[in-house]
Image (cartoon, rainbow, N blue to C red):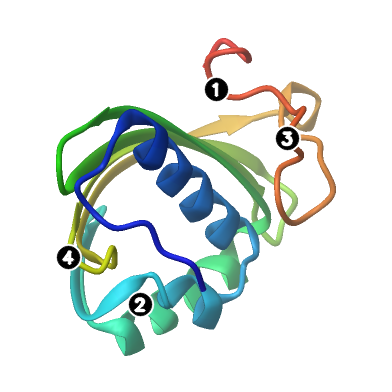
Amino acid sequence: MSTLAPPFTLQTATQKVRMAEDGWNSRDPERASLVYTPDSRWRNRAEFITGRAEIVAFLTRKWAKELDYRLIKEIWAHSDDRIAVRFAYEWHDDSGNWFRSYGNENWEFDAQGLMQRRYACINDLPIKADDRKFHWPLGRRPDDHPGLTELGL
């Protein structure tokens, strides 16, 4: 798996954000975990996670609950070894209730470009199926699909 290493430019930070979006849209916990250091530390909502094994377990639980998951990430800011993003994703539960989850993440990377820290704040908004905005087939968001800014999110 290709990694981009610090120091980040706007171009490489933007590429890093899209690579992260693609990994999460794969809904493959093992694949997604490979961009984190073996001892990566997360705060995701009220959950604290350390290491790839816990990341895989977390993502496995997440995608078993959050069905038809589709995510868009957008760069907010960056420095040499840190990137801030905003994101939104749509999903439904096993009862067919749809949600759009909004959030912000702060990322810190090691010298090899693996994420060593991830801090996420997320809020869930119940939506009607007709209010969904993310309509691509499951998997990678097509390059021509609007991003968060273009969608007014």
Where 116 falls versus 51 (above or below)? above
Other-residue count near label 1 (Cα within 10 Å), few / some / many at <14 / 14–19 / ≥20: some
Q: CA distance from mark 4 to mark 2?
A: 21 Å
**Given this view, does label 4 or label 3 mark the residue nearer the observer?**
4
Where 52 falls versus 125 (above or below)? below
Mark 1 in CB contact with mark 3 (< 8 angstroms)? no
Disc 3 element: loop
Q: Which comes before the other along the chain, label 4 or label 2?
A: 2
Other-residue count near label 3 (Cα within 10 Å), few / some / many at <14 / 14–19 / ≥20: few
Residue 83 location, x and y as percent? 25, 41
Q: CA distance from mark 3 to mark 2?
A: 27 Å
Q: Which amino acid type corresponds to the residue marked 3 in the rendered image?
A: Asp
Residue at the extreme bottom: 53
* The disc label shown at residue 143, or none: 3
**Given this view, does label 4 or label 2 mark the residue nearer the observer?**
4
**Given this view, does label 3 or label 2 mark the residue nearer the observer?**
3
* Label 2 sits on residue: 55
Q: CA distance from mark 4 to mark 3?
A: 29 Å
The quarter holding residue 22 reads bottom right
Residue 30 location, x and y as percent? 51, 83
Q: Is residue 65 left or right of residue 61?
A: right
Q: Which comes before the other along the chain, label 3 or label 2?
A: 2
* The disc label shown at residue 63, or none: none
**Which of 116/135 is in front?**
116
Q: Which amino acid type corresponds to the residue marked 2 in the rendered image?
A: Ile
Q: Residue at x 41, y 33 (%)?
A: 11
**Which of 71/68 is in front?**
71
